[in-house]
Amino acid sequence: MKQVELDGFDRKILHHLQQDGRISNQQLAERVGLSPAACWRRVRALEEQGAIAGYSALLNPEVMGQALSVFVLVSLQRHNLDSTEEFERQVLAYTEVLQCFAVTGNADFVLRVVVPDMRSYDRFLNEKIFTLQGIAQVHSNFALREIKNTQHLPL
Amino acid sequence: MKQVELDGFDRKILHHLQQDGRISNQQLAERVGLSPAACWRRVRALEEQGAIAGYSALLNPEVMGQALSVFVLVSLQRHNLDSTEEFERQVLAYTEVLQCFAVTGNADFVLRVVVPDMRSYDRFLNEKIFTLQGIAQVHSNFALREIKNTQHLPL
DNA sequence: CACAAAAAGAAACATCCTTTCTTTAAAAGT
DNA sequence: ACTTTTAAAGAAAGGATGTTTCTTTTTGTG
């Protein structure tokens, strides 16, 4: 999937679709200043080019009773392919892990884990992290407050 | 906004809406096993209760040329209300900062910053972080690889 | 068992999506 | 400068979908 060239219309379209993924094509067309047909063709092109990876409903963690975010720094004992692949495979399967990145710095991975409360986090660690082979260190940083939390890319 | 009680239908609805926020009400109804009208009423209720905070298009960072994610650990010099409020106010305005949490541990805040490349990140630091008053320490952890990156809450 | 309240299904109207066709505008070549 | 070609925009129509209202069914309670 190659990088893509965007003009002002495309950027406006993406902006509004990031803001409201369920906006009707008519409203979108009106806001970006195109006819519905032209707007629709651009949206389809952006989807086909892969600029738009998908659409999602955003849930409110508080209302859903999943209000505890934890940033977990994980270091592995060995850095061979087998160890890391196994770790990543498991992490992908854990629904509590919303995000996981391999990073530079002291730790090998940063995870963001979301659970209902401390009890659940304790269980998550004991059952799903400490049971993994080859974990050297785990450092938990608890989110005290959420200042900002989006996936909206700057345009 | 109070926490909400969900039954199996609601959970199925939310699951599918997280997976595809633009699914038609008809398809959704079919997949969860309800009539379109009943399904639609539940979706509306979930929106009104705040369980569904909104909908969004998910963009592909690679295709958009915004492929560098950085986890930035920030410590403040003073921890009074004025310092932190000013910091948070600025961070909210920076479109490069997708996520920002106040956390326990060595740092006061964890940010995830997304930029096109190192040059842009250098500029971001110099122009938007180092210019802030009362910053004690900034530690940058660069994402080498993205293993997982969603906002899908476990249901 | 009967009643009330809540939720589900059916159907109809309104709206929106998606396609096709036509028109306009921009680019390239002579 | 003019024609030719290509690409994208607008208009319009048919089909699909959303949203409402009304009726029926289910569920819970006295």
Image: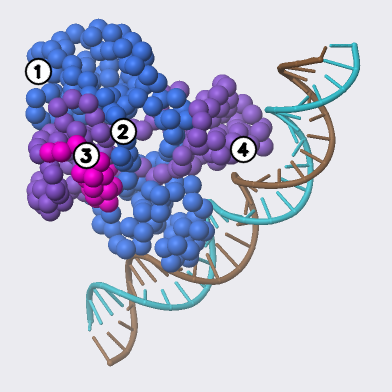
Chain colours: A blue, B purple, C cyan, D brown
Q: Residues within 10 Å of mark 3 (few under 14, many from 20)?
A: few
Please give left or right for residue C25 compared with residue C3 in the image.
left
- Compared with B137, A66 (above or below) is above
- Compared with B4, A90 (above or below) is above
Q: Which residue is mark 3?
A: B80
Q: Label 4: chain?
A: B
**Magenta stretch, residue numbers:** B76-98
Percent of width and height locating residue A108: 13, 23
Q: Mark 3 vs mark 4: give the one in front.
A: 3
Location of residue B147 (image quadrant): top left
Q: Are marks 3 and 4 on the same chain?
A: yes
Q: Are marks 3 and 2 in contact (CB under 8 Å)?
A: no
Q: Which residue is mark 2?
A: A145
Element class at badge 1: loop
Distance between the alpha carbons at the discs numbered 4 and 1 = 50 Å
Percent of width and height locating residue C19: 52, 55
Residue kind at label 1, given as amino acid type: His
Q: Residue B98, labelled with which disc?
A: none
Q: Mark 4 vs mark 1: give the one in front.
A: 4
Element class at badge 4: helix
Front-lying residue, A52 or A112 = A112
